[in-house]
Amino acid sequence: MCDRALPGERFLGRVSRKKGNYAEVTKLKTITPHHDSVEAPCEYASDCGGCKTQNLSYEAQVRAKEQQVHDLIVHVGRFSIKGTTILKPIVPCDIQFHYRNKMEFSFGAQCWVPRDVAMVEQALAEKGCSLGLHAPGFFDKVLHVNKCLLQSEAANKVLAVVQDSWQDPDLGLTPYNCRSHVGFLKHLMLRTGRNIKTGCPEIMVNFVTSSYKPELLEPLVNNISAIPEVVSIMNNVNSSVGNTSVGEEEYTLYGKPKITEILRGLTFQISPNSFFQTNSHQAEVLYKLIEDCADLKGDGSETVLDLFCGTGTIGLTLARRAKHVYGYEVVPEAIADAQQNAQLNDISNATFVQGDLNKIDDNFGRDFPKPDIVISDPNRPGMHLKLIKFLLKLRAPRIIYVSCNPATCARDLDYLCHGLADQGIEGCYQLKSVQPVDMFPHTPHIECVCLLELC
């Protein structure tokens, strides 16, 4: 594996790690560029760990992602799809830049010095401190970033204002040092939503700090609140040595504690730590595909089980045509948001329960009737074997598996359709369709919507 090398590109590299038949290579120099290579529009593309394929044409990106899904479904999932219509053509993203509604930047005590000379001078001018994105392979070094082409223009305004002022020595603000665990500023999280009435962008700014000292943040708050799109400035306090962006305490420094987003005709309240689909525009496309696969009759006779429901976005979009939706999620804050979102949209036929789906026991399934449709949207590790065994025993007529990791998705589809031979458990589903959806242009990530029907 070689990071930043494009398929078909000839390059000079150095083996940095080798184990068995697997090796990691550091790219040193391109000999023959990929025939679909393009000039990356972002000045940080060659050093930032985010948009690793900006230098590949978008058409080539989606072709590669579609092929990746095909290969995994065949080789890992053990499905024969040649001559079938199981694998659908990938759905590209109409908006390839400024599509992310959430970006998290880090304050760093050590600045990453990139290869570009101009950026080196800039880094040195920052006296070793920086605000930006973590350099690939380094937990303690941060690449100084003035703007990000993936987030909204309004969010970039906020980033520019913070960059211009946070290192003013008169403010006494210090970046958190991941090694010494000393410092105040940890993260700057920017979220973009849409106003319910106008549809215009509204920005939430969230400072993650090691302690609660609002007087230190007051000058920044005054500068940022002058930006018209900013409607919320929050402070999450994370006093632990861990450098996560989720705090133990949350304070409102300006405006309201939540912003709104509109999705499939529903309104969702988003708090600083809420999970929400990062690409709102493409989430509309994704959820429409899920609705099409669900194919609810609309007469209020069908029950939906929504596993890994998050803040309830998928379940609530289906509730309008279902008898009842039962959602399960491990994060209590997400369940609280889901319950509030149901109330906000006057949806009374949705029940959301906090629980760890990786630790279910024989009692799981007794609190809801047998569903007609199961929606499963796990995180990258996929579903636990306990949950897969439960689904094989439950035998719901249809399962819609939504995945952000085609490798674990193919594995789980194999279990559901072909069974667990080593444990004497037979599969009972037929794979009807796999629909790749590009949610994150210029990255290797790909989403899939898979429909399974009971044999």
Image (spheres, rainbow, N blue to C red):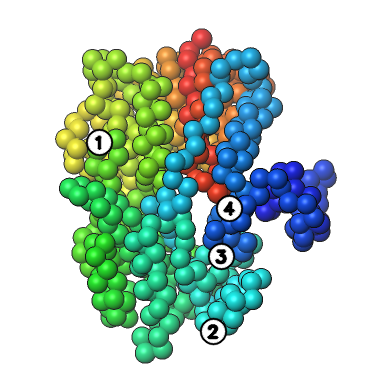
- N-term mark: 4 or 1: 4
What is the CA distance from the residue labelled 4 to the residue labelled 1?
Answer: 32 Å
Inspect the image, locate mark 2, and give the three-letter code of the amino acid beneath it: Ala
- Residue named by callout 1: 265
What is the CA distance from the residue labelled 2 to the residue labelled 1?
Answer: 48 Å
Q: Is residue 111 above or below residue 393?
A: below
Inspect the image, locate mark 4, and give the three-letter code of the amino acid beneath it: Gln
- N-term mark: 3 or 4: 3
Inspect the image, locate mark 3, and give the three-letter code of the amino acid beneath it: Glu
Q: Secondary structure at mark 3?
A: loop
**Left or right: residue 70 compared with residue 290:** right
- N-term mark: 2 or 3: 3
- Residue named by callout 4: 54
Q: Is residue 140 above or below residue 94?
A: below
Q: Secondary structure at mark 2?
A: helix
Which residue sits at x=40%, y=27%?
290
Mark 4 or mark 1, whichever is nearer to me: 4
- Residue named by callout 2: 125
Q: Quadrant of residue 296?
A: top left
Mark 4 or mark 2, whichever is nearer to me: 4
What is the CA distance from the residue labelled 3 to the residue labelled 1?
Answer: 37 Å
Q: Quadrant of residue 166?
A: bottom left
Q: Nearer the viewer, residue 138 or 84?
A: 84
- N-term mark: 2 or 1: 2
